[in-house]
Amino acid sequence: MLDNIIVFYILFTIVGFLAAMLGTIIGAGGGLVFVPLFMYWFPEWSPSMIVGTSLFSVMCNAISGSIAYIKQKKVLISAAIVFSLATLPGAILGAQMSGWFSGQGFMFAFGCFMLCASGLIGFKNFKKGERKEESLTLDQLTYSKPIGISISFFVGFISSIFGIGGGLIHVPALIYLMGFPTHMATATSQSILAVSTMIGVITHLLENHIVFSIAIPTSIGAIFGAQVGARIAKRLKAKSILALMSVAVFALAVRLILKSGILG
């Protein structure tokens, strides 16, 4: 019996490590992995328990990854603070209006939109040479605060409606709409995620939605996985990170399309 429990905890620690490592590299957190796995392994859990337990692990992932990226001087802290705060009213509005937009048709349409976004990221990534913005440093980077706030509000809104991680929308927006270098976009996204997930975790904690017997080993793995992911990302070229991002956005798009039920 004890051996089974030890194997159980080791398994979830490894899952947390691998999910956080990938999530930190692309700036998206591990929710894309945690949620479907929890749904498969624990069918008796309510959706709130799945999201709450996943969100706790994603928060630990994002905090650990943010610390690593700040040490690397990849995080534009001023943007991370403003954008993370801008996601909050969008998330609140999304929660209040979720009944209006959570229909099958809207979920299917947004999934198709993300599918196109995945293709666009992949297409742009195959162009010869790197984007000129990739050479910018933190001191050289300029951005439009109103555009960033608007994007972050939208990210919070969409994330709240569909229960998806905002990083998979935020990172491409930071790169292609605001001119962030890829490494700074993924690093700043991690810091935005760290702040925004704290609010969600507090809410789920008060509602007793977090299953700590799973969340703790998963989060321990996520903390270490995020550190490794940040070190790997530092050595990867921007094109490699964008390729991983394209695959992750594609996976999210397929998940939304299938979840809509329109295809049968």
Image (cartoon, rainbow, N blue to C red):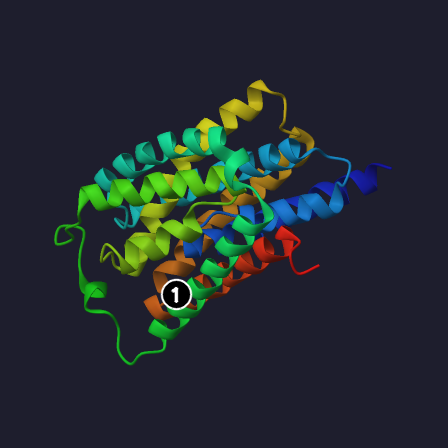
Residue found at the far right of this picture = 1
> Which residue corresponds to the image point at 44% horizontal and 61% vertical from the top-left?
245
For residue 181, what is the image quadrant?
Answer: bottom left
Q: Position of residue 234 (x, y in %)?
A: 35, 59
Give the amino acid at mark 1: Leu
Name the quadrant of the C terminus. bottom right
Q: At x 25% / y 40%, what residue is drawn?
A: 77
Q: Quadrant of residue 5?
A: top right
Residue holding disc 1: 242
* Mark 1 neighbour class, 10 Å CA radius: few under 14, some 14 to 19, many 20 or more: many
Residue sitting farthest toward the bottom: 128
Question: Along the horizontal axis of the image, is 241 left or right of 207?
Answer: left
In depth, the one of 153 and 11 nearer the eye is 153
Q: Measured along the vertical axis of the image, is residue 111 above or below residue 31?
A: below
Q: Pick whichever, 241 or 101, lies toward us.
A: 101
Q: Is residue 247 above or below residue 193?
A: below
Check the picture and name the quadrant holding the N terminus: top right
Task: Give the answer, above or below, for where 33 lies relative to 210.
Answer: below
Q: Position of residue 69 (x, y in %)?
A: 34, 48
Residue 236 can be seen, yes or no: yes
